[in-house]
């Protein structure tokens, strides 16, 4: 009889945890919806807005959390492996070919690196919240990691050079900037800073064999000289 009671209590605990996760997911969606509707994402493109609408329409609160493979031990270990020694960011893309192209060629961004790249730390709850507000952008989560030593070195050099109008990531590029159809400057962060990619639905991991988080280049110093006040 005691075993039956223990089984019932165990099932109730699991059900309570399940209900709590659904409440958390609902709150996250509401928060992200409100922030978007109040204009935080003013620069979204049409396909991004369509993706957001589709995510709301297709949201499955009863199974999506448990179906995702992102929270498995192997996947989380890969994501958080370097976060204490690097500045790590996540970016989402829809197709595997896009993920592989970023790994091979580097991360291209227009205007601001932080428009689509979100910083993560060793705080897994913070990561889950950020993931749930961005996962509809695509199944493939890109990991961008830059060594703290590189961050410190070039931040110091930028300060000494009086550079205030450019972000650090703009300095850590090796190609000439171009302009997109909107007239925004386009930068390319080297693929050495791309750790790899994770499919958050299937758990598949693509590792970048060229990943070197403390990578440096003579062009970085040339950029300091170029933008020096």
Image (cartoon, rainbow, N blue to C red):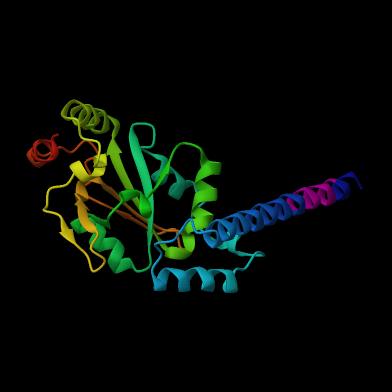
Q: Position of residue 30 (x, y in %)?
A: 63, 58
In the rendered image, the residue lying farthest to the front is 229
Does residue 10 belong to the magenta stretch? Answer: yes
Q: Is residue 181 above or below residue 126?
A: below
Q: Nearer the viewer, residue 106 or 174?
A: 174
Does residue 110 belong to the magenta stretch? Answer: no
Q: Nearer the viewer, residue 177 or 88?
A: 177
Q: Residue at x 29, y 31 (%)?
A: 148
Q: Position of residue 201 (x, y in %)?
A: 48, 63
Q: Residue at x 60, y 54 (%)?
A: 31
Q: Position of residue 96 (x, y in %)?
A: 33, 67
Residue 67 position by quadrant: bottom right
Q: Residue at x 51, y 37 (%)?
A: 123
Q: Residue at x 53, y 49 (%)?
A: 128
Task: Classify residue 123 as left or right of residue 154.
Answer: right
**Quarter of the figure with the C terminus:** top left
- Total tally of numbered discs in the picture: 0
Q: Position of residue 60 (x, y in %)?
A: 62, 68
Q: Is residue 225 above or below residue 176?
A: above
Task: Classify residue 33 as left or right of residue 185.
Answer: right
Q: Is residue 202 above or below residue 218?
A: below
Q: Is residue 96 above or below residue 176?
A: below
Majority SS type along the magenta span: helix
Task: Classify residue 145 as left or right of residue 214.
Answer: right
Region rendered in magenta? 6-14
């Amino acid at each position: 009889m005691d075993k039956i009671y223990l089984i019932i209590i165990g099932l109730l605990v699991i059900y309570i945890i399940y209900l709590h996760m659904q409440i958390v997911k609902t709150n996250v969606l509401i928060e992200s919806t409100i922030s978007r509707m109040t204009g935080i994402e003013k620069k979204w493109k049409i396909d991004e807005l369509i993706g957001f609408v589709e995510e709301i329409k297709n949201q499955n609160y009863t199974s999506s959390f448990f179906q995702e493979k992102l929270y498995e031990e192997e996947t989380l270990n890969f994501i958080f492996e370097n976060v204490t020694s690097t500045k790590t960011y996540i970016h989402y893309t829809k197709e595997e070919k896009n993920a592989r192209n970023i790994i091979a060629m580097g991360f291209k961004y227009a205007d601001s690196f932080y428009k689509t790249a979100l910083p993560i730390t060793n705080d897994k709850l913070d990561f889950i919240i950020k993931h749930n507000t961005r996962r509809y952008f695509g199944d493939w989560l890109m990991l961008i990691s830059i060594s703290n030593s590189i961050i410190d070195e070039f931040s110091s050099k930028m300060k000494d050079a009086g550079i205030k109008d450019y972000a650090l990531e703009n300095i850590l590029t090796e190609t000439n900037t171009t302009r997109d159809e909107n007239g925004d400057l386009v930068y390319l962060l080297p693929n050495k800073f791309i750790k790899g990619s994770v499919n958050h639905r299937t758990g598949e991991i693509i590792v970048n064999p060229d990943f070197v988080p403390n990578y440096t280049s003579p062009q970085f110093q040339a950029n300091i000289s170029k933008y020096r006040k």
